Amino acid sequence: MSASAQVSVVVPTLRRPAELERALRSVLAQTGVNGRLISIVIADNDPAASAETTVLRLRDEASVELIYRHVPRPGVATARNAALAETKAPLIAFLDDDEVASPGWLAALIDAQAQTGADAVFGPIQGRAPDARPWLRPYLERFFGRQGPAATGLVEHGFGCGNSLMVRATALPGPAPFDVSADQSGGEDDALFAALASRGGRFGWAADAWVEEYAPAHRATLTYALARAFAYGQGPSQTAAKTGDWPAVARWMLIGAAQAVAFGAAALALTLVLSPRRADMLDRAARGVGKLFWMKGLEPHFYGARELARLDAKRA
């Protein structure tokens, strides 16, 4: 990729005006990008277009173009695809609306891509769960965080889409690279990166591209984290099933059964003595159960219509 290639930042959002403003201001405060950031595309996934006011207000003080796209059909993959249609930049960075980028975030991602030649580059995340119960907070901040190698370089696999930079031509092919069948459950990035790997794509790590991710109160719970852990566990089995690799599905299910039994027993023992470490063991057990029960129809729904219904119920 050319050293002067331009980049757009995509920020999907669903009815989080304060968090969105915080995320956008962190992007507008980026340093060291030397004019390469040409636009920030905000995909508003709320049918009521609740993010428009925030975007219009920030346009007056923004040094780059803020592009607002209303995407009334709730769904994380649909929102990302719609945002991509608004920019032709050869490099696309993704930041979630509950994340806050450090000042050198984008420059670190760009530099890592140039250094590694990777098709998709990811950075570390510091999880924040200020509303969590004290005993649970360390686990949740690890859960919502992301750790990787100490140094920038190539890595063997992809991470989540939040806090990433992708070469559009190779990592985001076609007009709708994200699978909309994952609109409600998530996992559209897992499918994207599995397809990239199958094409011989390369993944990179930007050790200095830090962001903070803030878990809202309704997500800063053990119940929510374990449901997400179950869904993460489903990923390997579902990916293998989609390609018809049934020996791999069987292998993942056997691994899941062993994890569920071993970590479930450890979680029970730690629960009896009220150890905070029980959260970590429950997490690993939930991921094992997910590998076993990966079948269609068993996916938890965290996005799209389900999240919108939860927000409506809270406001009622």
Image: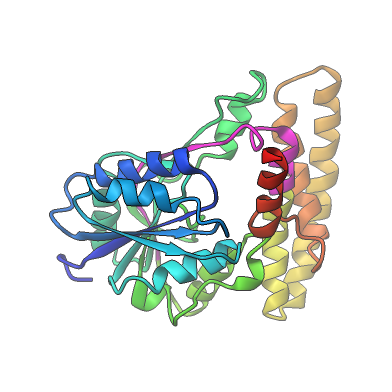
Residue 274 drawn above or below residue 157: above
Picture layout, residue 284 above or below residue 181:
above
Please state which of residues 33 and 80 is positioned toward the viewer in this rendering: 80
Where the C terminus falls, by quadrant?
top right
- Report x, y in % for residue 61: 22, 45
From the viewer's perspective, is 185 left or right of 159? right
- Is residue 32 toward the left or the right of residue 94 in the image? left
Q: Is residue 287 visible?
A: yes
Quick check: can you spot residue 208?
no
Image location (x, y in percent) of residue 253: 80, 61
To which quarter of the image does residue 92 belong? bottom left
**Quarter of the rendering containing residue 45:** bottom right
Q: Is residue 109 left or right of residue 178?
A: left
- Where's the N terminus, which quadrant? bottom left
- Residue drawn at point x = 23 percent, y = 49 percent: 62
Q: Give the range drawn in magenta.
A: 203-229
Q: Which residue is drawn at 82% across and 41% down?
A: 262
Residue 196 drawn in magenta:
no
List x then y, in percent, for residue 49: 50, 56
- Left or right of 83? Residue 243 is right
> How many numbered dots are placed on residues in this image?
0
Front residue (pair 98, 152): 98
Query: Residue 305: x, y in percent?
Result: 68, 58
Q: Is residue 210 highlighted in magenta?
A: yes
| Colouring scheme applied when the structure was drawn | rainbow
Seen from the viewer's position, the closer of residues 120 and 257 is: 120
The residue at the point 39 percent across, 46 percent down is 54
